[in-house]
Amino acid sequence: MMRDHYVFSNGRLRRKNNTIYFESEDGQKIPIPIEKIRTLHLFGEIDVNSKLLTYLSQYGISLQIYNYYGFYSGSYYPRESKESGFVIVKQCEHYTDKYKRLYLAYQFLVSAVHHMLRNLRNYNLESMDFFEEIKLLTNHLQTSTSIQELMGREGQIRHLYYQAFNHILKQDFVLEKREKKPPRDPVNALISFGNTLLYTAILSEIYKTALNPTISYLHEPSSKRFSLCLDISEIFKPLIVDPIIFTLINRRQLSKKHFDYLDGEICYLNEEGRKKFIMVWEEKLSQSIKHRTLKRNTTYRYLIRLECYKLIKHVLNDEVYKPLKAWW
């Protein structure tokens, strides 16, 4: 069965015959059968060559590269095989048309808030003031007349949502405020690391479709990022990433020993912490639910792909986009 592979040690990836080998610095050779690789995630200092990249391209395998601190650095993707000029043109039309763009941006946020409130209900926080305030702000989303107004209200909602973390998290983990660049405490480090894994997972699924990841609607397209991944991630951050964080902390699978600091300020998961997070992450993505439309079991990972397919149908005017709202 194909799966993601994570490499934490320093060394070299090379092709030998019809197999990929990871050669560690101490001379150990570990085979990674090509037919079992979906994506390679490189956290260590890894040497690769063009022979390996050509071989990976033949099988449509991507490389996701992270720096020493576990922050996303970049990706290598094979030449796109499912690109469609027609779909790209239609994506652009929905970006340049103010109302079409506003519709999609609004739908991403409606789904995001649905999953935020779902998390709060799961922890019996409906009686808290921020729960009602989030619901009130959600009603105001529909009256927003610009992307800037939507983003402003989304920021207010997320601020209230993050306040609830301190009523959910046990041990001595506290989230005073969301700090992204850089994260300065363990909870922020967990959110950033989880969002990074989600970003690369979404990018991998987008590349399996005809969508262009640089054309987005809620987030402004940029030359330095795949902004459509950020749009779609709004749906899945509270559905996938946040519950993983709650589980890891409340079940004491992570503690303060799994975090390190750079210059006493930048907080990040150390190697042991990243391995623990990724183990739960992979379990979550492979977890399946009975899809009420498809009438079959579907994994969380495939739910991301389905969201991409729904966007394609929408921009092609085949079917109006309705975002995922967890029913289970």
Image (cartoon, grey):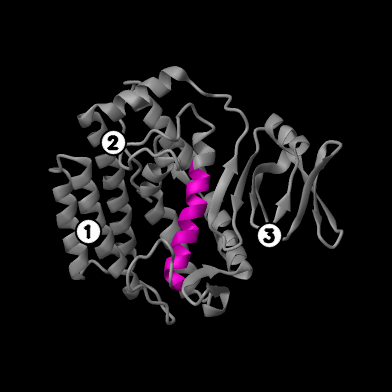
Q: Position of residue 265 (x, y in %)?
A: 46, 74
Which mark sits nearer the N-terminus, 1 or 2? 2
Q: Which residue is mark 1?
A: 156
Q: Position of residue 254 (x, y in %)?
A: 53, 74
- Range drawn in magenta: 185-202
Q: Secondary structure at mark 1?
A: helix
Q: Which residue is mark 2?
A: 104
Q: Which residue is mark 3?
A: 8
Q: Could you tell me how far apart the alpha carbons at marks 3 and 1 are, in whole angstroms?
A: 37 Å
Most extreme residue toward the front is 263
State which quadrant residue 275 falls in: bottom right
- Circle 1 residues within 10 Å: few <14, some 14–19, many ≥20: few
- Circle 2 residues within 10 Å: few <14, some 14–19, many ≥20: many
Amino acid residing under circle 1: Gln
Q: Is residue 162 above or below residue 145?
A: below
Amino acid residing under circle 2: Leu
In reply to whether residue 100 is colored magenta, the answer given is no
In reply to whether residue 196 is colored magenta, the answer given is yes
Question: Looking at the image, which residue is at 38% across and 20% down?
Answer: 89
Question: Looking at the image, which residue is at 58% across and 43% down?
Answer: 75
Which mark sits nearer the N-terminus, 3 or 2? 3
Q: Is residue 305 above or below residue 199?
A: above
Q: Secondary structure at mark 3?
A: loop
- Circle 3 residues within 10 Å: few <14, some 14–19, many ≥20: some
